[in-house]
Amino acid sequence: MLSNTLKHRLTQWPVNLVMGFLLIILLLPTLQLLSGWFDSDPQLWQHFADTLLLDLISNTLLLLLGVTFGTLVLGVGLAWLVVMFEFPGRRWLSWLLLLPFAMPAYVLAFVFLGVFDYSGTVQNTLSQLGWTPIDIREGVWGPALVLSLVFYPYVYILSKTAFANQSITLIETAQSLGCGANCIFWRVSLPLARPAIAAGLSLALMETLADFGTVELFNYATFTTAIYSAWEDFRSLAVAAQLSSLLLLFALLLLGTERLTRGKRRYNQQARLSSPPFTLSRKAQWGMSLLLWGFLALTLGIPLLQLSLWAAQTLSQEWDARYIDWFNSTLILSVLAALITVALALFMNALQSQRHASRWLRFSIEVGKIGYALPGIVLAIGIMGLLATLNNWLNTQWFLGGLFALMLAYLVRFIAVAYGPVQSRFLSIKPNIIEAARNMGASKWRMAWQIYLPLLKPGILSALLLVFMDVSKELPATYLLRPFGWDTLAIRIFELSAEGLYERAAIPSLLLLLIGILGLWLMKRLGVIK
């Protein structure tokens, strides 16, 4: 007779084998980057070290500091106002303040350059008034401002949820002890929301590290621009991989800091605030409402207006059949990547939700999600090196130049994005429902189709939408790995805006923005965001 432990191990080996294979696929690009240190290019590396490395490190750190300040002030401040105070339009603003998330950073960058650069409307007006023009391209503040305005929703959404789930009893107790709104913010709400804020900030900073389009448009040299230069200008995959592995260290440091800050805290929902606990005078309410509408006009209204004006000016010359191809390429790549990534995220969640899932299995799944910390350009370099090696071994060109490399990049980069929403739905399924179905003799297939699938449907749809939106905006990996003839709207926007043709980039930007806003609207309709 076989013992139960041996029986369990025998039934688990196919699962562990499949998971091990999947883990190898997800980790190979990272391992390829690290192996780049064994294939050095001393002269080119010495050139980078002598002329660029210190500037790259200081520029990247300055940009991270600027975005940290901007996203914290905007994300935490706006979340605090819409949760804790009642004012006209609060419910609408609570959702509309998320919409900058739909704006790709490189789109806002070229709109700001078009409006605020030397030849733009604002600078011309300042010159006519006798004011000294400002140089928006000088220093770090231009790209830091743009990235903060686009990435603050990461901090905003998590801070808003954390503030809304704080106990009203705690706030009332602090008020009874003479603590006002400012005092409660600094001494009660902010410490309680700190893990959520740290999680949102780490996402914003990893997106900042991954950004390529914005810093390139501002001519602000960071690691991503140097990696691209090493590959595009010097054709050195080894130096690009070495620089990428240094950038990977930045990302891992951010992840480690976030885990350290969070510690063993968990985001347990207590009692959602039914209404804002602080009241303002009528005048202050209208003042706050005007302030937030004005902020939204600056971040979303002005860019939309400027893009619409440029699009109207260039529509007759710019629009042709190629736009149908770019739009279709964007949709096909986004839909295909979303389906593959969510299918694997569903598979990984199903394995992890097993009653007897091993520690090795749980560890493998956690490690497999590390790809989200890899900037797109870093991932692309790793995959190019990996597939070039495979091509040499097998004497073929099949692995590079097709959709395979691009789908692999999207899978590794966004598996964590798909995993979260599906996992939250798995955790919400009550065990007694599953036990009842088993006791009634339901087969595995019947349980999958009639119990699991309906209960998981909201999480699966959310994951599909999130991956779809991220892939449609993704630029660096798509730019480097796309097959010939597979240009997307994001590629078209970057190529035109990099040449200063902002007016012609307006139409693809509006199309991409429309995709993002529709995605957010669907997520609100599904109840994914409040």
Image (cartoon, grey):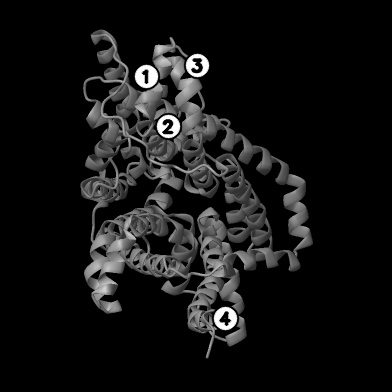
Q: Which residue is mark 2?
A: 75
Mark 1 vs mark 3, CA separation in Å:
51 Å
Q: Secondary structure at mark 3?
A: loop
Residue type of the residue flagged with mark 3: Thr
Q: Which residue is mark 4?
A: 391
Are discs 1 and 2 less than 8 Å apart at CB? no
Nearer to us: label 1 or label 2: 1
Taking 472 as reference, is 185 left or right?
Answer: right
364 and 523: which one is in front? 364
**Residue 67 percent across, percent down from the top left:** 52, 34
Are discs 3 and 2 less than 8 Å apart at CB? no
Mark 2, Cα crowd under 10 Å, few <14 / some 14-19 / many 20+, is many
Are discs 1 and 4 less than 8 Å apart at CB? no
Q: Which residue is mark 1?
A: 172
- Asked if 356 appears above or below 424 in the picture, the reply is below
Q: Secondary structure at mark 1?
A: helix
Mark 4 vs mark 3, CA separation in Å:
57 Å
**Residue 248 percent across, percent down from the top left:** 62, 54
Are discs 4 and 3 less than 8 Å apart at CB? no
Mark 3 vs mark 2, CA separation in Å:
32 Å
- Asked if 98 appears above or below 350 in the picture, the reply is above
Q: Earlier in the sequence, mark 1 or mark 2?
A: 2
- Asked if 505 appears above or below 422 in the picture, the reply is above
The quadrant of the image that shows the C terminus is top left
Nearer to us: label 4 or label 3: 4
Q: Earlier in the sequence, mark 1 or mark 3?
A: 3
Q: Secondary structure at mark 4?
A: helix
Residue sitting at 47 percent across and 15 percent down?
Answer: 183
Q: Earlier in the sequence, mark 1 or mark 4?
A: 1
Q: Which residue is mark 3?
A: 132
